Amino acid sequence: MSSLTLNAGSTLNLNLNSFGNPTVPLINVNGALISASTVTINLVGATLGAGQFPLIKYGSLGGSGFGAFAAGTFTLPTGVSGSVSLVNNTANQSIDLNVTIASLIWDGTINGNWDIGGTANWKTNAYYTESNSIGPAVIFDDTASGPNTAIVLNTMVAPFRW
């Protein structure tokens, strides 16, 4: 579209329809993107992983500028924790969504058991607590400070996969 003016109190409900991480902006404004005041961006149907994704491409940004845009409703996949924020990507002339996913990192301080809610073998003494669906993203790397690097699965686990 050639330009887009968003009135005070506007809400953009963007539906990703479970397509995953967008590689192109959902809205493309060749000219001016103008916001009068607060514009809330809600995302539904999102199954996003971690990263930065273009939502709105603009030719120029006017009115109240990027400061008028606020992240609204966004739900991470079940069993995943993290946060989202909006980014003014001036190099790309786009408003992007930045998704950060919190991962559990294996430490093995207590023992080698990967169980559900029983042993704090993850960094920061965290417990793996998901028992009803897909669990959080987990990382096994070379940073474990505990002596237990041989992992024993005492239950069926299903960590989140990208």
Image (spheres, helix red, strand yellow):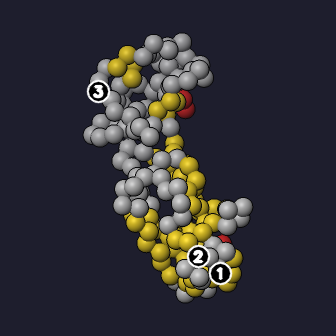
Spatial separation of the CA atoms under disc 1 and disc 3: 53 Å
Spatial separation of the CA atoms under disc 1 and disc 2: 7 Å
The residue to which callout 1 is attached is 32
Res. 16 image quadrant: bottom left
Res. 144 image quadrant: top right
Residue at x 35% of width, y 25% of height:
115
The crowd level at tag 1 (other Cα within 10 Å; few <14, some 14-19, many 20+) is some
Mark 2 vs mark 3: in front? 2
- Determine the secondary structure under disc 1: strand
Q: Which mark is residue 151?
A: none
The residue to which callout 2 is attached is 29
Q: Earlier in the sequence, mark 1 or mark 3?
A: 1
| Residue at the outermost right position | 91
- Determine the secondary structure under disc 2: loop
Which amino acid, mark 3? Met
Q: Position of residue 101 (x, y in %)?
A: 51, 45
Q: Position of residue 37 (x, y in %)?
A: 60, 83
The crowd level at tag 3 (other Cα within 10 Å; few <14, some 14-19, many 20+) is few
Q: Position of residue 50 (x, y in %)?
A: 52, 47
Residue at x 36% of width, y 56% of height:
18
Q: Is residue 67 visible?
A: no
Spatial separation of the CA atoms under disc 2 and disc 3: 48 Å
Q: Earlier in the sequence, mark 2 or mark 3?
A: 2
The crowd level at tag 2 (other Cα within 10 Å; few <14, some 14-19, many 20+) is some
In the rendered view, does 91 fall on the left or right side of 49?
A: right
Position of the N terminus by quadrant: bottom right
- Image label count: 3
Q: Which mark is residue 156?
A: 3
Query: 110 or 65: which is nearer to us?
Result: 65
